Amino acid sequence: MDAVSDLQSALRRYWGYETFRPLQERVVHSLLNGHDVAVVMPTGGGKSLCYQLPALVLGRTVIVVSPLIALMQDQVAQLQQMGIPAAFVNSSLSTAAQKSIIDSAVRGDYRLLYLSPERLARYDTVAWLKRVPIAFFAIDEAHCISEWGHEFRPEYRQLNSLRTNFPDHPIAAFTASATRRVRQDILAQLQLADPHKYIVSFHRPNLRYLVKCCQDQNEQDRLLVSALRAHAGENVIVYAPTIARVEETVDFLEEHQIAAVPYHGQMDPATRKRNQERWMSDEVPVLVGTIAFGLGINKSAVRAVIHLSLPKSIEQYYQEAGRAGRDGEPAECALLWQEKDTSLLQFFINQVRDPLEQKRAAQRYFEIKNFAESHQCRDRQICVHFGETPKWESCSMCDVCSDPPEWFVGRRPGARPFRMPKFLSPAIDTELLDFLRQWRRRTAIQEGTAVTMILQDASLEDICRKQPKRRLDLLNVTGIGEKKAERYGFGILRALEQFRHGARADKQGAITESPADETIRLLKAGRTFEEIAAIRGRQVRTIIETVAELVEKGRINFDERWMSTETRQLIEGAAAQIGLERMKPIKAALPANIDYPEIRLVVARMRHEANAASRA
């Protein structure tokens, strides 16, 4: 395959794309010509294609350094479905499986081989890699190598040995969020030789940044519900600061008839994966997660990303907010924070023992705090933070530069109506899109794979626009290459035919029982807090908080079996002396073995009784 003339052919045949995104083709040519490169592209900008396509064209192996096992597995599965030989070596594989892949790699069987930075630093790995026909090394999430980066990982620092161990092989560094200082550190640590540098603008013209300091959680919750109702039926990510807040938020939304699923690191892996799939496949529109969610998530039609606390850095916020609007269509990025967030961030900074790292964390804190409190264009602040100097002063979209949406502030007298800009996509039949999404969801279940392994949202939308009649027509659909057309062509065409004959999608995500009602039902059935937590996929503390609220509202009675009489009496005595407003002073007055959940339950009953007495 001629390295230059066949680029367009490979792009069409394997990826199903007619054209490159900004800077992609130039990056590919640099790698084909053997140069080191440093690439900064926003989330969703198409970084992976920049090293995957050269691997295919050169016919040799590209070694990809990736930080997460799940990320490796997803990318390899996608490549294999496209007909591109790829594999990974990590701890999830047996020793025999690893040996088999290594033997195949030495024979040159793979175009892409994914490794973790820890694996690449091992002496035995370096030894067998020297027998592999390597084209170049691609470092994904390269900002992790910098101590000034917001996600510094010490294991990435070991990648500075690449130049020593493989002096004749080009190195390509890719990241979505790196300040000028971090970019310089990446170049120095990897010892890139006269690299070709490519930086896509940090300005995302389709994203609307909205920042508000909320008085309390009640205001935050009210705005959240208003935002989700404004985006009803659309895909939304909500970032919560803690695991407890994730679960509380999901229950709160379901009480307001808004279907949502939780995602956090302490969930059972199978449940976490299932929740992600339900959101990815549009079965449930809202996903509430901690920052554990998002890396490598490839969903283009996210219409809003909402943060419920102040992030640790502008880089973190930009990366997470940037998961909205990857299809180029308008999307909102709302940061709903509280003053207490600053105290929490300062507390975490004070826990850092290394003086230099503490200094760096403090600097990131002041930058994000200034961003949130300032009255300057949000978009411009982000661009300037990353070393870009826009020629414009106002983005005409953020809450500073225009009138915010009604859900954000309510309609103010004399406010100018704001219209989100319309971009390229013509109108599509939403009923057909829903039907194709249902076909994709069922196909993924049958194959035991993720919906994104079948087709991306952009492909489904293009099918709606082009209405292909033959399998050959599918090759004109964005994101459908030869392998995809061969594998799913019959199913797609059959689904289109069924729709033309009146078939429609089943309604998904209806809430039949509220979290509170489900908890009440399970309590009446004699279930323990632990059993209810397991059934509902929640932490025990979250269930107890729900029960306490129900007791306080008088919807259920306090059950004497929840704790010993002695414990209950001790809590009642302390609360009677100290008052019912705050839990911390009551906790301080009690023996150390009595914890907050028990205190919360007793105080809930006492508050209910006090309220009832005041009304009598």
Image: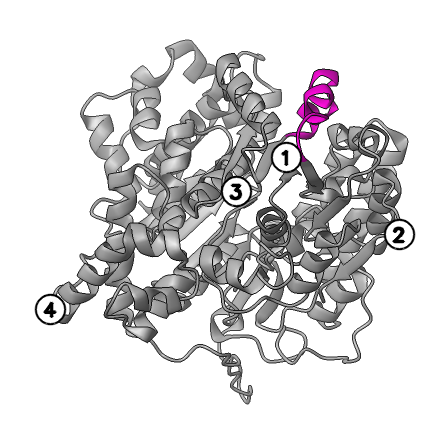
In the image, what residue type sits under mark 4?
Gly
Mark 4 or mark 2, which has the lower sequence index? Answer: 2
Q: Is residue 40 left or right of residue 297?
A: right
Tell me where residue 549 appears, x and y as whole percent: 38, 38
Q: Is residue 231 above or below residue 321?
A: below
CA separation, marks 1 and 2? 26 Å
Q: Residue at x 30, y 50 (%)?
A: 487
Is residue 124 one of those drawn in magenta?
yes
Q: Is residue 466 left or right of residue 313?
A: left
Q: CA distance from mark 1 to mark 3?
A: 14 Å
Q: How many labels sit on residues?
A: 4
- The numbered disc on residue 194 is 2
The residue under the point 41% across, 34% down is 272
Q: Could you tell which of marks 1 and 4 lies nearer the N-terminus?
A: 1
- Mark 2, residues whose alpha carbon is within 10 Å: few (<14), some, or many (≥20)? few
Principal secondary structure, stretch drawn in magenta: helix
Give the residue at mark 3.
Answer: 293
Q: Is residue 356 left or right of residue 340?
A: right
Query: Which mark is on residue 67?
Result: 1
Q: Earlier in the sequence, mark 1 or mark 2?
A: 1
Please provide the residue range marked out in magenta.
116-133
Identify whether 591 is placed above or below 469: above
Q: Position of residue 216 (x, y in %)?
A: 57, 53
Badge 4 marks a residue whose secondary structure is: loop
Question: Quick check: marks 1 and 4 in contact, CB under 8 Å?
Answer: no
Q: Secondary structure at mark 3?
A: loop
Q: Amino acid at mark 2?
A: Asp
Return the residue at label 4.
Answer: 502
Q: Quadrant of residue 138?
A: top right
How far is mark 1 from mark 4, CA to CA? 46 Å
